[in-house]
Amino acid sequence: MNKKTDFTESQIAILKETEQYVSGLLSNESTGHDWHHIERVRSMARFLAQSEKGDSFIIEMAALLHDVDDPKITQSGDSHRVQDFLSRLGLDPATQDTINEIIDSLSFSSNLQGKKETRIEGKIVQDADRLDALGAIGIARTFAYGGRKNRLIYDGSTDDQSSVAHFYQKLFLLKDLMNTNTASKIATERTLFMRQYMEQFLKEWNLSIDLNKEVSK
Ligand code: NI
């Protein structure tokens, strides 16, 4: 079990309400950003916070809400569900702003444009979210997302729009973008596993091409 946190009664109630809100929204989500992803990110963020510290309540709230306005899910670049939800909860404005800012800077693409998490709470949640894009689960999520977007599994090039290309264009780069040392260690292990997976994948792919040449001789 997780060690006891020092949440107040009202924080516990708010976290429960947030869980219900997010699980209701994302339980049937099929691009790999479902409620189980949120739970994994939250647990990983808790784990990272053990060594990195930070405000546990902010970390948990940001982890729970981090994908609610993601354009991958909402299909719109202009969704304010988090903001609306937070103001309905009646949290103090400073806490609302902090959670909003963290979520805003969170996505991989916004970070590539130079937007960085500056608070430790944001760094932790960002690392936890990125770690869930790696390893065995990362592989599953990549192909699930690709399928949902009508992408090919592979197109014979790592420079294309396929799911396999995504490993080379984004996923293998993530381990060098981790904010915390703990996440960086986990990312290195998970990336190694993905590299091994990709090696086997390409071996099988190329073998089938060779066999095909044999057959057509
Ligand atoms: Ni996420």
Image (tube, rainbow, N blue to C red):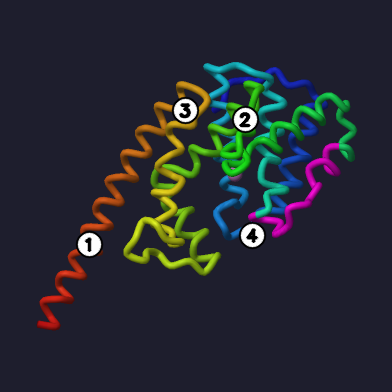
Residue on which disc 3 sits? 183
Residue 170 drawn at (x, y percent) = 46, 46
Q: Are marks 2 and 4 in contact (CB under 8 Å)?
A: no
- Frontmost of labels 2 and 4 is 2
- Frontmost of labels 3 and 4 is 3
Q: In this view, does 160 lie above or below 182?
A: below
* Amino acid type, callout 1: Glu
Could you say whether the residue bearing mark 1 is in a helix, strand or loop?
helix
Q: Is residue 88 above or below residue 75?
A: above
Residue 55 drawn at (x, y percent) = 69, 20
- Frontmost of labels 1 and 4 is 1
* Amino acid type, callout 4: Asn
Quarter of the figure with residue 211: bottom left
Going by the image, does 68 lie left or right of 216? right
Quarter of the figure with residue 118: top right
Residue on which disc 1 sits? 204
Q: Are marks 1 and 2 in contact (CB under 8 Å)?
A: no
Real-space Cα separation, disc 1 to disc 2, in angstroms: 39 Å
Going by the image, does 167 lie left or right of 144? left
Per the rendered image, the range of residues in magenta is: 72-86
Real-space Cα separation, disc 2 to disc 4, in angstroms: 30 Å
Crowd tier of the residue under label 1, counting other residues whose Cα lies within 10 Å: few below 14, some 14–19, many 20 or above = few
Q: Name the residue: 59% across, 37% down.
A: 111
